[in-house]
Image (cartoon, helix red, strand yellow):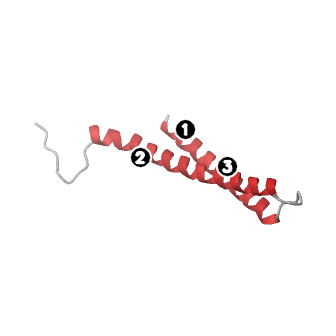
Amino acid sequence: MVEHDDHEPQDGPQRAVEGPVSEMAQVARIAHDLNNVLNVMLIYSELIDRSADGRAPQHYVHEVREAAARGADLTTELGRIARHST
């Protein structure tokens, strides 16, 4: 009979579940962040579209560009997680 030290972590069902659950939580967080980024882009693009003189204020364009860059970063992060989990 093999005895286990109570202070050492053991591999088993709980250990096997931690990886996928942690990865899914990470994917859910990134998806939420990506949704926020896309909403910023939609809002500012709507403001640009509604600008009275047809010329968008420069800070609207800047916000759209910043949000797009963050969205690209989040997409890269999702790809990294997907590659790691397969």
Q: Is residue 51 above or below residue 25?
A: below
Q: Is residue 56 above or below residue 35?
A: below
Residue kind at label 2, given as amino acid type: Ser
Given residues 72 and 82, the one toward you in this image is 72
The residue sitting at the front extreme is 52
3D distance between C-alphas at marks 2 and 3:
22 Å
Secondary structure at badge 1 equals helix
Q: Is residue 1 left or right of residue 41?
A: left
Q: Which mark is residue 83?
A: 1
The residue that mark 3 highlights is: 72
Q: Earlier in the sequence, mark 3 or mark 1?
A: 3
User: Crowding at label 3, few (<14), some or many (≥20) Cα neighbours within 10 Å?
Assistant: some
User: Circle 2 is placed at which residue position?
Assistant: 22
- Secondary structure of the residue carrying numbered label 2: helix
10 versus 69 height, above or below: above
Give percent across and percent down for residue 50: 80, 55
The crowd level at tag 1 (other Cα within 10 Å; few <14, some 14-19, many 20+) is few
Q: Residue at x 41, y 46 (%)?
A: 22
Q: Quadrant of residue 24?
A: top left
> Amino acid under label 1?
Arg
In this view, the mark in front (2 or 1): 2
Q: Residue at x 13, y 39 (%)?
A: 2
Q: Earlier in the sequence, mark 2 or mark 1?
A: 2
- Where on the picture, by quarter, is residue 66? bottom right
Mark 2 neighbour class, 10 Å CA radius: few under 14, some 14 to 19, many 20 or more: few
Task: Name the front one of labels 3 and 1.
Answer: 3
